[in-house]
Amino acid sequence: MASVKSSRSRAHAVTQSKGINKDTGPKLEENLNVFKSDNFDADAFVQSKCHSLNEKEIRQLCSYLLELKRASAEEMRRSVYANYTAFIRTSKEISDLEGELSSMKNLLSTQATLIHGLAEGVHIDSLSDVVPESTSDSSPTADVREPSDLEKWLTEFPDHLDVLLAERRVDEALLSLDEGERVASDAKEKKTLGHAVLLSLQTAIAERRQKLADQLAEIACQPSTRGAELRAAISALKKLGDGPRAHSLLLNAHYQKYQFNMKNLRPSSTSYGGAYTAALSQLVFSGIAQAATDSLAIFGKEPAYTSELVMWSTKQTEAFALLVKRHALTSSAAAGGLRAAAECVQIALGHCSLLEARGLALCPVLLKLFRPSVEQALDANLKRIEESTAALAAADDWELTYPPSVTRASGRSAGAVPGSTGAYQHKLSSSAHRFNLMVQDFFEDVGPLLSMQLGGKALEGLFQVFNTYVNTLVRALPGSMEDEASYEDSGNKIVRMAETEAQQIALLANASLLADELLPRAAMKLAPLANQKDDLQRRASDRQSRHPEQREWKKRLVNSVDRLKDSFCQQHALDLIFTEEGDSHLTAEMYINMEGNADDMEWSPSLIFQELYVKLNRMAAIAADMFVGRERFAMLLLMRLTETVILWLSQDQSFWDDIEEGPRPLGHLGLQQFYLDMKFVTCFASQGRYLSRNLLRVVNDIISKAMSAFAATGMDPYSVLPEDEWFTEIAQDAMEKLSGKPKVANGERDLNSPTASVSAQSMSSVRSHGSY
């Protein structure tokens, strides 16, 4: 009921968001009455509710309703399965009670017949005592009457039955018992036999029937009884009216049979026990299948017997699962052998699924019992990936190479991109190659276990392993040693430092390639839609909305990489701004203390911003080789580094305290130099195609603060600043000298730059903001 309510509430929330008006509260019952009407028109109802929705909203609503239908069906299946055992047990108890009541009824009927017979015998004796003597004396020489055929039959019947039972001629004995029942029934109806004789006949029939039933039960319990002989004995016992006993004996006979065959089966000496699982599955499930076939052939589809068959089959399946766990799964799970555990589970499920054709769906029983062991193997496998990667990171030289040429067990190269015709391979360091290889194997092993609903757990576990690897990469940055306490719980702390810029950028190449392409592509093996065979239109619509969990998982991977990117940019920004002694290269004094004549000065950007430009150019050259085909990531990295430096300047309160309230005011030369530095930053960022809107906004805000500080002295900043062309010319000259590349005019930027529309708003817009 809770699931129904939750589903109804979710559907209500969705329809509200799409503009569908639904009544709540007291009107809910009234709305439901619409569907109960015999004149309900589904098309008209949908048209009235969805006329205001567009095509996209209708598709989204249909997709949600289909998902809700699948969830409801799954919930119903789980509910039925969860209560099925109790239902079967209750049904069997009711059947047993009915049998006991029937036995009591027969016993009472027999007792009543006996009492009536005794009473009638006493009455006959009393009548014989009063017969006149003349009657007996009237025919002293009366002739002895010949016995009738019925009397002869009554005399021979018990002996004949005894002979048949002694010779185990079951079919003939059944026919004789049927004949005796028919004679007794006719005699009782026509009153051709006295009560004493009839009671004697009925007693003889009952005794021989019970004796025959015991003989048949003994035959069914014999280990040597097989096949047709067993079915004949069970069928005969059922004909005797003891169906419940016959069915129990049938199931027990099949149980004893495969138990006997299991005596010669020993657990495999191999590491995973696949052969043992296969042999045991063959014995157990073939036995269950044969029992189901015999039960259906003899007893049909009577609920009492089918319920007992299901309970018995479930019990045998549980016993089988315990044996597999003890001799195969436990050792594999403890050692992290996910592939071995998956093989055992797949073998068992393969044999078990064959029973579905006989109406026995026992796979959920196996999945429930196997799940803890498989989860243990999953966790151990993830732990092994984490430890192996950490060990390799301790010796990684952080040099990017193509993957080794050795092929994996799957038959393809470890670094090849699946589905690419050109077999393009990405460059990674040794630890990242190993991490990728183990992840590929991991998803291949987890893929067959989707029926156990382990996809979410596998993705979460792998994210944690990747996050630990990113922590390792962060610790490989030289400036991250001070943050070592933050990663005390991240595993192995030993990691080889990335000393050069190329090695540090290689760390980012490792993490970004894994998070953006390799891991999400490998996770597609967990896609449940891969095995569906729907039409093309269905597939196209599903691809647009499928795998929300994997999309969210990829976002988490990218966010983890952003931590590494932030650490990288912070380290390089601090190295650029501060000296080894802790002094700053970017202080207010470098602008406040400027003196002299502006015309006599040789203008150029400040040294720290020239170093920033050189560093960015050097990193861009390195990234161009490492991020082939992924230039956007390199551009975003340079953009983030530039923003980090400028944001630090914007947020350095001591710098702005000296500019705005220091002992010496900001002069016109300092303002001009500051404006030139900011113009230089926007020029080289625009030329390098990493000028972001955020960077331009922060630069404009900084310039505004500097001009406000200058205006506070009573001077007009516009009167002392040259035109923008002057600053642009100097910035271009500086870039030409520092890079050795030809000058690029401000109006001749690359129109393909993603920041072209941003750079069109030059810093001259600051001057149009009005007076200070």
Image (spheres, grey):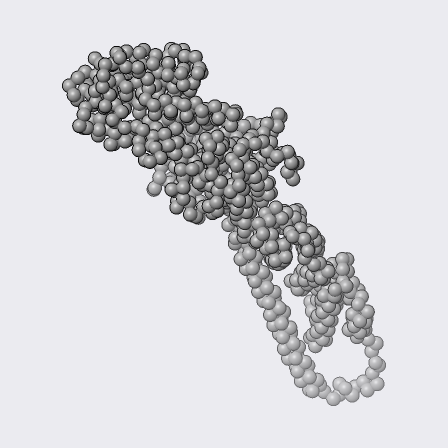
x and y percent of residue 162 in the render? 79, 72
Residue depicted at 84% across the width and 76% down the height:
146
User: Which residue lies at the image location 61% right of the left edge and 58% below the top edge?
Assistant: 326
User: In the image, is 69 to the left or to the right of 25?
Assistant: right
Q: Quadrant of the C terminus?
A: top left
Q: Is residue 509 visible?
A: yes
- Looking at the picture, tell me which residue is in the foreground, 16 or 390: 390
Give how far across and how far down residue 247 sits, in percent. 67, 60
x, y (%) of residue 536?
58, 27
Nearest the viewer among 452 and 196 is 452
User: In the displayed image of the protein, which residue is found farthest to the left?
Assistant: 714
Q: How many marks?
A: 0
The correct choice, above or below, for 134 with respect to 727 in the image is below
Residue at 64% x, 80% y is 119
Q: Is residue 686 visible?
A: no
What residue do we see at 42% from left, 47% from top?
A: 488
Position of 404 with respect to 27 (left or right) is right
In terms of depth relative to the viewer, which is nearer, 130 or 221? 221
The quadrant where residue 185 appears:
bottom right
- Vertical arrangement, residue 58 with respect to residue 180, above or below: above
Q: Looking at the picture, how far across and down is residue 496, in whole percent?
A: 49, 40
**For residue 473, above or below residue 105:** above
